[in-house]
Image (cartoon, coloured by chain):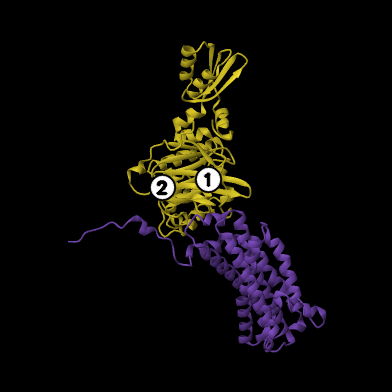
Amino acid sequence: MTTVVDAPTTTARVPRTGLVNGPFLAIELRRLLRNRRTVIFTLIMPPAFFLIFGTADMYTTQSVGNANVTAFIMVSMALYGAMLATTSGGASVSVERSQGWTRQLRLTPLRPATYVLTKVAVAMVMGLAAVVVVAAVGLVSGASGDTWALAGSLALAWVGSVVFAAFGLFMGYLLPAENVMQILGPVLALLAFAGGLFVPLGDGLFADIAKVVPTYGLAEIVRAPLTGEAPSIWAVVNVVGWATVFVGGAAWRFRRDTARV
Amino acid sequence: MTFTDTFPLPAEAGTGPLAIHLRGLHKSFGAVRAVDGIDLAVAPGEVVAFLGPNGAGKTTTIDMLLGLAQPDAGSVSVLGLDPSRAIAEGRVSAVMQSGGLLKDLTVGETVELTASFFRSARSATEVLTRAGIADIADRKVGKCSGGQQQRLRFALALLPDPDVIVLDEPTTGMDVEGRRDFWTALRADAARGRTILFATHYLEEADAYADRIVLVSRGRVVADGSAAQVKNLASGRVVTATLPDLTAEQDAALRAIPGVQSVEQRRDRVLVHTSDSDGVARHLLTATAASDLEITARGLEDAFLALTTSGSPA
């Protein structure tokens, strides 16, 4: 004989414990694609810049080491696109806070960490799309070089852009504005200029200032496979330093946001 | 006239934890005492209106009840649990006053997304139907009316099939029809035995939809009882009569009559504010020399205001 005992209803309703939530990720990706402005800024602008700046005839013949100048500019624009994508992905927490969505989420069992990880994951997917689009346009428009060097640089551009996902989160939690990307868009363009993504830095004062700009270190590391030169210690210090600032800042604001007051 | 704690609590029979139990709750923002010592015990299955004017401390109390804010002093338990635990287990859910929805999602997507946060949730179709918005599942949240958005929040609150639902001014900004539809949906749900606590500043809403009304003013509970009891408090009458030279004894005797809120002398007339006009009239006509007696009803809203704006109830 067996006795059937009804399980108490409370045990069936323990909170989700996993950090990854599939449906959440899927809906977030769908939202991203619906946002026309994000799509234009991250998927159309960087390849357009590449076509304007990088496809002059002499660039296709000039070499930077393991690839031509066109490939060098392609990788710079891929990094710029990935930066834009991950920053806006991270910064989307700002809009969701102002709409009260994050407060609403606190009335569900969703863990705040899952929310942030999902935001970063979606930002990285968008970053990957930005890199792929620039690479596709680049490779049919004269970018050439050692396959592994190109693949390595593009992969680094994508992976490195995670630093800017943290930047976006930090700013998203810090800035109250609903249109936070209207501030961050120009800021990113400025950082891209100052870090040498759009034009070469040359030597002198400007190049010295560039060394402390958040894009500088990442740009140098991303280009290393193309140039064949190991990145300088400055570049590594720059990336690690800014990553620490952005991740720390995002974590600080995130904890403040979820703290019970 | 305050009759806190007179409402019978079924849970006192010892049938498990109270649905909501607030003890000595205090919360200040700077020098403002938003919640100034609230005690409240809600038994499972009760439908309670948390009634008070704007700024009475209703939302602050609800925030503490849901674990969104931490009390300065006092304790909160929901179904015998810490609020955050009760939320994590899906045993309490809430419908907030405004916000909390993503405008770019559709109604259906919002429900499916929220459902994914719970390990076990009712189906999207079921909660949309019960909230009366199954027909607009494909509509963008940003294109929904205030009433539709509020019913969406209600649908979300139904997802975990909670034992307790808390609603903070759920019908603010709705038109008459939206309000009626919302309450119809809520009332149908309450019939299933769920505990419901809703904040409102509409006396009629509290009267029509709650079994019990907890009247709050300036962060305190000023009255707590059945809808009829509280309505009676708020719908007091004024008895006036000609009675020159009101003596101190007469004044004291009038004040001693149950239901009397205040006694005033204006020239040769005496004015008695009371919730039991019959008792006062009987006393004046039989025990004093009063003549020309008049009884006038106090407007519901006037009385409600008088009750919730006086510093300490008489």
| Figure check: A203 above or below A166 | below
Residue drawn at 58 percent across, 45 percent down: B34
**Image quadrant containing the C terminus of chain B:** top right
Observer-side mark, 1 or 2, equals 2
Name the amino acid, label 1.
Answer: Gln
- Chain B shown in which color? yellow
Q: Say which element carries label 2.
A: loop
Indicate the position of residue B254 as horizontal and vertical percent values: 50, 20
> What residue does disc 2 label?
B19
Say which label, 1 or 2, has the lower sequence index.
Answer: 2
Q: Say which element carries label 1.
A: helix
Give the camera-side residue of B63 and B159: B63
Q: Quadrant of residue A37?
A: bottom right
Q: Is residue A13 left or right of residue B61?
A: left
How many residues crowd mark 2 within 10 Å: few (<14), some (14–19), many (20+)?
A: many
Q: Would residue B184 be seen by someone viewing this image from the given angle?
A: yes
Chain of the residue displaying label 1 = B
Mark sitting on residue B150: 1
Indicate the position of residue A77 as horizontal and vertical percent values: 69, 75
Indicate the position of residue B95 as horizontal and vertical percent values: 50, 47
| Figure check: A62 above or below B24 | below
Indicate the position of residue A88 as horizontal and vertical percent values: 64, 65
Give the camera-side residue of B49 and B218: B218
Q: Which chain is purple?
A: A
Disc 1 and disc 2: Cα gap in Å?
24 Å
Residue drawn at 63 percent across, 47 percent down: B31
